[in-house]
Amino acid sequence: MNWTGGTPVPLRGSVDFQNGCVMVAPMITITIKGLSKETHRELKKRAALHGRSLNTEAIAVLESSVRSTPVAAETNAVIQQARAFRNALKFRVTAAEVKRFKEAGRA
């Protein structure tokens, strides 16, 4: 704990008591090899759009892609609602009928 203004503040790392400095663990770094120029260009555009550095944008994209997205949950909910609606219908439509309806609508 670091005491500043009477309030304990947790430190991330350890204190070197001989030199009086805080030793902070290094951040994890990755290297992305083989990134296409197009992907790099699009990532730079996204970074500019969001007011972020290229590195910060890459981190945001990676973090959002590894987390469970609410979109997937919403999609599953819509699918379940559609199935419930279809099952509640008093009639069934075959694939051949759907094809015929589509072709009739295009004529």
Image: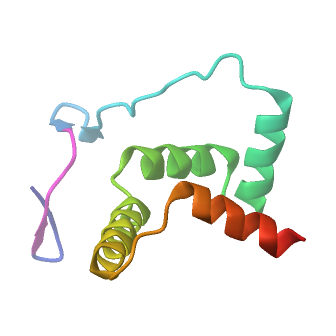
With respect to residue 67, does 99 lie above or below?
A: below
Q: Position of residue 49 (x, y in %)?
A: 75, 65
- For the point 58% across and 50% down, the residue is 56
Q: Position of residue 101 (x, y in %)?
A: 69, 70
Quick check: 100 left or right of 87?
right
With respect to residue 21, does 10 lie above or below?
A: below
What's the magenta region? 7-13
- For the point 65% across and 17% down, the residue is 33
Viewport quadrant of the N terminus: bottom left
Residue 86, magenta (yes or no) = no
Quick check: 91 left or right of 18?
right
Quick check: 18 left or right of 88?
left
- Whether residue 50 is visible to the viewer of this picture, yes or no, is no
Between 87 and 35, the one nearer to me in the picture: 87
With respect to residue 19, does 9 lie above or below?
A: below
Q: Quadrant of residue 22?
A: top left
Viewport quadrant of the C terminus: bottom right
Q: Quadrant of residue 21?
A: top left
With respect to residue 51, does 90 lie above or below?
A: below
- For the point 84% across and 35% down, the residue is 38
Q: Position of residue 3 (x, y in %)?
A: 13, 64
Between 34 and 54, the one nearer to me in the picture: 34
Between 13 and 20, the one nearer to me in the picture: 13
Q: Position of residue 44 (x, y in %)?
A: 78, 48
- For the point 70% across and 63% down, the residue is 100
Quick check: 80 left or right of 41?
left
Counting labels gives 0
Residue at the farthest right position: 107
The coloring applied to the image is: rainbow
Between 4 and 102, the one nearer to me in the picture: 102
Residue 8, magenta (yes or no) = yes
